[in-house]
Image (tube, rainbow, N blue to C red):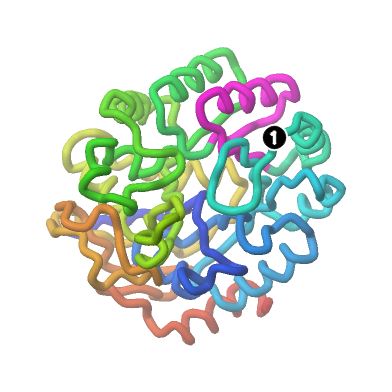
Amino acid sequence: MTIRLPGLADVHAHLRVPGGEHKEDFGSGTAAALAGGFTTVLAMPNTSPPLVTADLLRRVQQQANAEALCDVHLYAGASPAHTDELPALGRAAVALKIYLNETFGPLRVTDLSTLLACFRHWPIGKPIAMHAEGPGVAVGLGLAAAFGRPVHICHVSRASEIALIAAAKARGVPVTCEVTPHHLFLTQANVPRLGPLGDMRPPLAEPADVAALWAHIDTAIDCVATDHAPHTLAEKHSENPPPGVPGLETALPLMLTAVADGRLTLDRLVALLAQNPRRIFHLPEQPDTWVEIDPAASYQLSNEGLLTKCGWTPFAGMTVRGRVQRVVLRGKLVFEDGKVRSDRDVRQRHSQDKGGRS
């Protein structure tokens, strides 16, 4: 039996362009996306250099349009040195990303004046997403309430954070949030086995935190996002390993396994991975686009055969149920039986579908 899902949208991925192409690029990252059932990817701005000027963002978007195998939209990064760029960035980017906490890359906002500038000058019709952990969540919710404009909280990982977000939603604060598969399926207990491959931001949490996330999966949580953050194995095993794990190819099988286990319904999975991301981030429709899966397929996730450049997953060895068989994008078969259907052909079709932009 085959089940057809709409093309999925990942609102949180690091495709490493510019500056990190040795661990991912638009071609490899979107090949991994198609393998995972994602036909739209929103790429983060903490690149090298970061996407904090309109000129750089436009040039990188042109590169994505030319090289990506599915739709890629770029975040702009909030930067104290470039608040004057916010209106122009707002015309070019899908959303603004504000980093309140430490992350991989140069972007972090620690001063109130920059936060106020972001909320005053970012276009009201474009979302503001925040990397906010612990008390930072309260800061994001306070700004959403003060300015009466939506805020999206990224990769919620703690029971206290989701409880606060749920309370804010109940009082009408315009907030949405996402959770990652690694925060739903892994805990601190996995860190000794994974070593540096289990290092990410936010860090893995305790079982009680994971239970709280699952308890809110049908209510306060709006999206499942991968936070796909590839690094090479050499980097992860270095003396100063960078945080982050890949996730584009494993998110859907993990969530389909949760459906098989009765932890959520298939309709809710579609809402979390397709419908809500498109609604929250005002993403364009993709006509004649779908993902065909075999929900009965049972197999072990493996490092072998991954299309992401980094070539590893923290979920290697985990048994999952549900395999992507093929992906159709705008009426064209782009992925089938573990392989992208001709990179060059897909790129040519994608360029034509987007009006021949390069």
At horizontal 30% and vertical 64% (from top left) the residue drawn is: 312
User: Residue 124 at what x, y percent from top left?
Assistant: 76, 38
Residue 66 part of the magenta segment = no
In the rendered image, residue 115, in percent from the top left (x then y), is placed at 75, 33
* Relative height, residue 32 to residue 120 (above, below): below
Answer left or right for 119 relative to 154. Answer: right
| Residue 182, placed above or below residue 263 | below
Pick the residue in front: 306 or 357. 306
The image quarter in which residue 289 lies:
bottom left
Query: Which residue, given by chain and number where applicable, does mark 1 sit on?
Result: 110
Q: Is residue 34 visible?
A: no
Which amino acid is tagged 1?
A: Thr
Check disc 1: other Cα within 10 Å, few if <14, some if 14-19, many if 20+.
few
Q: SS of the residue at dot 1?
A: loop
Q: Quadrant of residue 332?
A: bottom left
Q: Residue at x 50, y 15 (%)?
A: 167
Residue 256 pos. (x, y %): 25, 48
Q: Which residues are magenta?
A: 127-153
Residue at x-position 17% and y-position 38%: 261
Instruction: Based on the picture, tell me whether residue 128 belongs to the magenta stretch.
Output: yes
For residue 249, which quarter of the picture? Answer: bottom left
Position above or below: 37 against 305: above
Which image quarter holds the N terminus?
bottom left
